[in-house]
Image (spheres, rainbow, N blue to C red):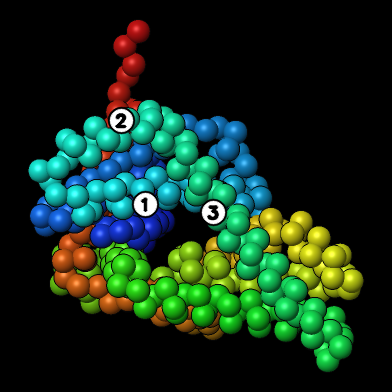
């Protein structure tokens, strides 16, 4: 009962909730301390110039990632501020927020922090492996060996980092919501009614996941760096830094290709490495977590449809 040509919706796990993005809006649903559900919305703003850039292969990946990073931070900030606040203290918390600054300033700040955090993380995971591999230059002097060693170190750092943060209770729950997000998307794309029972039967893995993208940056980097100098160290580091957008752009295109190939028996294995990484970045969710994910997705669909209808209404002059 597969559903054909369904929109490619995406989402993101937040603290005690899930965010889903539609054509016109992003909606987050979280479960509050008193077991109630609260929603948060950020409407998509028309950005013609940005939309044009997002249609250019290899460049569109970098633009989409920076945009998603800034937007995702707003929803993460909302969830972290609200999930554990007692409802009776809502007015007090909101009053404190007003003192901290205007809403516009907070949104701009969140977007900036999100972008900078993303770029800083990518910078660290690019530079440290390059330096570590350079120490092994006397043992593995060849270009191929150096790139493979660098890629291996980067992979170990990535897996180790994800594994250790997943052991903390808070991140473990975020990873459960990540699994709930994937299950809802899979149920929707397979044409099943969005009930807790139907959604729980779905896989917690998905080909379009950002975790897959992260792994592809490691693999793609190994091949891209084959074409640039790796010695001396300063030159290697300069090339690594300047090639970050190139690696990101190519990795995004690889992610798109693997998603398109997922229903072709011989080629679907191309996306398996990313799915394997998701075994770390997702956990099996509880029924209550799946319920939150379903509510978030349904609210996004409802508001998205509402905004589409508003667009079609004739404007009164």
Residue 303: assigned label: none
Q: Which residue is mark 3?
A: 117
Which comes sooner in the sequence, label 1 or label 3? 1
Q: Residues within 10 Å of mark 1 (few under 14, many from 20)?
A: many
Between 301 and 122, the one lying in front of the other is: 122
- Give the residue at x 21% y 66%: 290
Q: Residue at x 44, y 79 (%)?
A: 163
State which mark lies toward you, 3 or 2.
2
Q: Where does the image place residue 197, in percent across and percent down from the top left? A: 15, 72
How far apart in space, not on screen, are marks 1 and 3 (Cα)? 13 Å
- In the picture, the quarter occupied by the C terminus is top left
* Residue ID at (35%, 74%): 168
Q: Count of labels shown?
A: 3
Residue 204 located left or right of residue 53: left
Q: What's the mark number on residue 76?
A: 1
Residue that carries the numbered disc 2 in the rendered image: 98
Secondary structure found at label 3: helix
In front of the other: 54 or 190: 54
**Where's residue 292, x and y in %?**
20, 59
Of labels 3 and 2, earlier in sequence is 2
């Amino acid at each position: 009962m597969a559903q054909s040509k369904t929109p490619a919706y995406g989402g993101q796990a937040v603290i005690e909730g899930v965010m889903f993005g539609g054509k016109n809006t992003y909606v987050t649903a979280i479960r509050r301390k008193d077991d109630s559900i609260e929603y948060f919305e950020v409407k998509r703003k028309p950005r013609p110039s940005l939309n044009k850039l997002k249609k250019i292969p290899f460049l569109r990946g970098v633009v989409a990632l920076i945009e998603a990073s800034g937007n995702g931070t707003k929803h993460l900030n909302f969830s972290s501020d609200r999930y554990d606040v007692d409802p009776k203290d809502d007015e007090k918390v909101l009053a404190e927020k007003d003192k901290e600054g205007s809403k516009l300033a907070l949104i701009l700040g969140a977007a900036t922090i999100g972008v900078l955090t993303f770029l800083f993380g990518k910078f660290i995971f690019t530079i440290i492996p390059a330096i570590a591999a350079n120490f092994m230059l006397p043992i593995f002097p060849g270009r191929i060996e150096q790139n493979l060693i660098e890629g291996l170190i980067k992979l170990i750092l990535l897996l180790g980092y994800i594994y250790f943060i997943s052991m903390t209770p808070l991140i473990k729950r975020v990873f459960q919501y990540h699994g709930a997000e994937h299950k809802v998307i899979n149920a929707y794309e397979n044409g099943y009614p969005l009930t807790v029972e139907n959604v729980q039967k779905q896989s917690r893995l998905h080909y379009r996941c950002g975790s897959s993208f992260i792994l592809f940056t490691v693999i793609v980097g190994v091949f891209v760096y084959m074409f640039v100098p790796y010695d001396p160290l300063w030159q290697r580091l300069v090339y690594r830094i300047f090639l970050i957008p190139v690696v990101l752009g190519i990795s995004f295109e690889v992610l798109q290709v693997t998603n398109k190939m997922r229903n072709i028996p011989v080629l679907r294995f191309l996306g398996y490495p990313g799915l394997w990484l998701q075994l770390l970045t997702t956990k099996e969710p509880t029924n209550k977590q799946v319920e939150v994910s379903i509510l978030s997705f349904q609210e996004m669909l409802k508001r998205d449809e509402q905004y589409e209808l508003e667009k079609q209404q004739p404007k009164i002059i």
